[in-house]
Structure formats: structure tokens, C-alpha cells
Amino acid sequence: MLDIELHCHTRYSPDSLVKLPDLIEHARKVGIHRLAITDHSEIEGALLAQQMAPDLIIVGEEAMTKQGELLCLFINELIPDGLTLKEAIDRVHAQGGICGPSHPLDPRRFGIGMENLLEYASEFDFIETFNARTRETSKNDEADYIAQRLDLPRVCTSDAHTLQEVGISRMRIREYTTPQDFVAALRDAELLPNYSSLMVNVSSRLASIAHGLGFDKR
């Protein structure tokens, strides 16, 4: 069985300072076997990390669409900002990747909302139903209920922006061979959810300030 973390940010995101070598080392230390790097509107860091640890890293992106954020996995080309949700989904699938909405019902964090969640349900490969940084726990519960009602795989993530968050929420799945087989494996996954500390939000704000002042050097 594989322990996986499917939502993680690095210093290639504007709200994280995590360095790629440190992330790879820490993920292995805490028992993560597959780690999706999903920086905001960026895949450069994920591609570099995959070269450094091809057995560990899944290239991903948290893409910003006109309707909200989309978690994209197993991609090799950037999904640009400003596309409609449908256009972004189609671009992910065209390159053999999979996708689903991140924190879909969280209004404070660019969730796509209930209307879009239902409208595009047939296009999604999964729904992120537990996000460790979602503070209104009812929003995770609602997303979980909808995913089960729609018979879509559920994804549980840490949405890590710091090393300490990596793997605090994770999933345990069987081995897989392709992105599509990965989706099938998600259906039988064991979800291991845990909420992060409120202090991680402070860390993200400080990281944003550091980026803004030019203190971060990749």
C-alpha cells in the first residue's frame, strides 16, 4: 500500500517557502510514497522535483479558473490562469491527467461552489472532500456528502504550505499503473484526515510577505 499526499505547495507558490530538496527529504521521513506538488498556477517546481525524485513526485498544479481552483494531477503542461472550468478540465484530460476541485465549498479560498460542483460533476475525476486548512469543517462534510451522492472518488489532503504539514492528512491506496488506474484506486482508498494548526495560516502570510519583498530566492 502507498501513503500519498496529493496537495502540496513549494516556494514556487507565492505563499510558501518550502525548498524542493527539503520537501523530498521530509516526505520520505514521514512515510509518504507519492507526493503531488500542486503549486498555484505553476508547474516548474514540480517538474524539477520529479527529476530529483521520479519515484516520489507527481507533477500537479492548483490552477485558477474563472470559477475557482482546480487540482490537477499527472500533467506535464501548465494550465494557464483565466480559463473557464470546462476549458481547464479539457486541457488536463488532453494531456492524460486527472483533476477535481480543491476545497470546492470553501468560499474563503476560491472554491468553485455548489452550483459548479454539480454542473461539472461528470467532468471531474475526483473531489477534494477533506482539506486540512478548511476552517469551516461543515464545508468538508458537505463536499464529502456530495461526492458520495455523485459516486465520485474522495480525496483527503493536507494542502501543505510548510514542511510540518506534509502528510498530516493523507490517503492510503493500492499500487497503480496509470492515472486512470489511480482514479480507480482512489475509490478504495483509506482516508486519514487531520486538521492543521491555525498557525499554518500565519506561515503562509509570512511567506507571501517574503515573496513580495523579494527575500525568497529559488
Image (cartoon, helix red, strand yellow):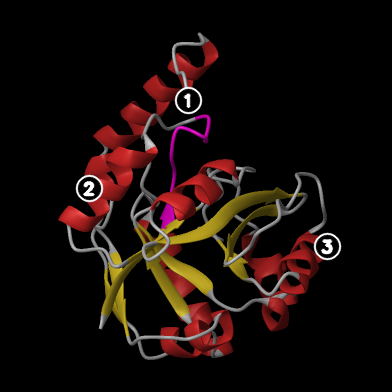
Residue 144 in view here: yes
Residue 93 is left or right of residue 45, and the answer is: right
Q: Nearer the viewer, mark 1 or mark 3?
A: 1
Q: Secondary structure at mark 2?
A: helix
Reply yes or no: does residue 111 show up in magenta.
no
Residue in front for this viewpoint, 8 or 111: 8
Q: Amino acid at mark 3?
A: Glu
| Mark 3 residue element | helix
Q: Which residue is mark 1?
A: 218
Image vertical order of residue 81 relative to residue 144, above or below: above
Which label is found at residue 87? 3
- Helix, strand, or loop for circle 1? loop
The first of marks 1 and 3 along the sequence is 3
**Magenta range:** 7-14
Mark 2 is on which residue type? Answer: His
In percent of the image, x 68 and y 75: which residue is there?
Answer: 96
Q: What residue would you read off at disc 2?
A: 26
Q: Position of 99 compared to 135: left or right?
A: right
Specify the amino acid type for callout 1. Arg
Residue shown at 22% from the left, 48% from the top: 26
Q: Report the magenta stretch's main SS.
A: loop
Q: Quadrant of the N terminus?
A: bottom left
Q: Is residue 32 left or right of residue 94?
A: left
Instruction: Give the image quarter of residue 121.
Output: bottom right
* Magenta region includes residue 9: yes
